């Protein structure tokens, strides 16, 4: 059984494959002159998605036709090329063209998950007995579509990640509307972060300290739903990657899958196409 439905996997692979460099089936420059055929990118990609969804180690998901070393080498190569970020940007463009991104209201919030192997993006978690953890800061549109992601150690406060997260969202989306309102929780309630949003040309709606949270939840709940959807993927709940580039590769690959899922769900009510899924539930 595939890790994700074909209606998500196939369009993702089509765009992913278009960004891959052209490689020969054999490696003529091999120092030993070996003529063993190179593992197909599609095969490795399916194993990578399997590792992302289930959070399994590469040794557990490796097969006779694709070893764990092949998966590691290919993931390192793809992350260095920034392919997952490009695929996510393409998914956002498709969503904006067919549905329309709600960029007038952007919500930003952070989330801490486990990172037991440590690494470049790990730090002592303040909510998990100082164990190694990963923090991600996500910006989403008015409907919860992930726009920009920044990763850091769990010991980093989420507030300083606000400006890089909004900058990442602008890079992924491109041109922003003239008026953009940013919805934030009480952790960003200070003059410094209000000035940061003003420098970027945004207005800010920040929850006040000392006021009960349910009263001022406002429009910020959509980014909480986005974090919940990202935590459905095992690789993000318990990240064992040590390279910062590989961590970002999996984060943006997850964001691309979530964007495609929301696109298909909302497009089902507006469009008809061959192979349209019959079930609304897309895991």
Image (spheres, rainbow, N blue to C red):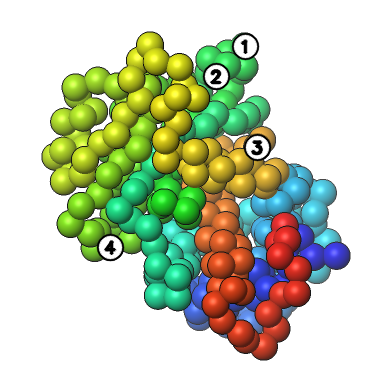
Query: What is the x, y in percent for residue 68?
Result: 73, 54
Mark 2 or mark 3: whose residue is earlier in sequence: 2
Q: To which residue does mark 1 refer?
A: 129
Give the CA distance from mark 1 to mark 4. Answer: 40 Å
Q: To which residue does mark 4 refer?
A: 174
The N terminus, quarter of image: bottom right
| Viewer-nearest residue: 58 or 46 | 46
The residue depicted at 37 percent of the width and 22 percent of the height is 186
* Quadrant in which residue 217 is drawn: top left
Q: Is residue 118 visible?
A: no
Q: Is residue 101 visible?
A: yes
Mark 1 or mark 4: whose residue is earlier in sequence: 1
Q: To which residue does mark 2 refer?
A: 125
Give the CA distance from mark 1 to mark 3. Answer: 17 Å
The residue depicted at 52 percent of the width and 54 percent of the height is 255
Q: Nearer the viewer, mark 2 or mark 4?
A: 4
Q: Residues within 10 Å of mark 3 (few under 14, many from 20)?
A: many
Query: What is the x, y in percent for residue 82?
Result: 43, 59
Q: To which residue does mark 3 refer?
A: 237
């Amino acid at each position: 059984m595939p890790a994700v439905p074909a209606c998500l996997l196939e369009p993702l692979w089509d765009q992913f494959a278009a960004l891959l460099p052209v490689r020969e089936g054999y490696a003529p420059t091999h120092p030993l002159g070996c003529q063993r055929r190179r593992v197909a990118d599609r095969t490795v990609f399916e194993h990578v998605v399997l590792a992302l969804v289930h959070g399994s180690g590469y040794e557990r998901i490796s097969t006779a036709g694709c070893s764990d070393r092949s998966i590691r080498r290919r993931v390192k190569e793809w992350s260095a090329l920034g392919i997952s970020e490009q695929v996510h940007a393409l998914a956002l463009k498709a969503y904006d063209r067919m549905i329309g991104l709600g960029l007038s209201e952007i919500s930003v919030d952070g989330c801490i998950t486990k990172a037991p192997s440590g690494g470049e993006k790990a730090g002592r978690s303040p909510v998990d007995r100082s164990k190694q953890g990963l923090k991600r800061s996500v910006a989403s549109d008015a409907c919860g579509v992930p726009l920009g992601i920044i990763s850091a150690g769990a010991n980093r406060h989420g507030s300083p990640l606000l400006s890089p997260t909004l900058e990442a969202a602008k890079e992924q989306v491109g041109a922003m509307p003239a008026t953009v309102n940013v919805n934030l929780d009480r952790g960003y309630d200070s003059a410094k972060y209000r000035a940061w949003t003003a420098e970027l040309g945004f207005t800010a709606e920040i929850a006040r300290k000392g006021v009960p949270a349910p009263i001022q939840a406002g429009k910020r709940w959509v980014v909480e739903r986005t974090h919940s959807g990202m935590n459905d993927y095992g690789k993000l709940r318990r990240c064992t990657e040590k390279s910062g580039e590989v961590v970002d590769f999996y984060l943006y690959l997850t964001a691309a899958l979530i964007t495609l899922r929301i696109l298909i769900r909302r497009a089902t009510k507006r469009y008809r196409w061959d192979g349209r899924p019959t079930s609304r539930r897309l895991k």
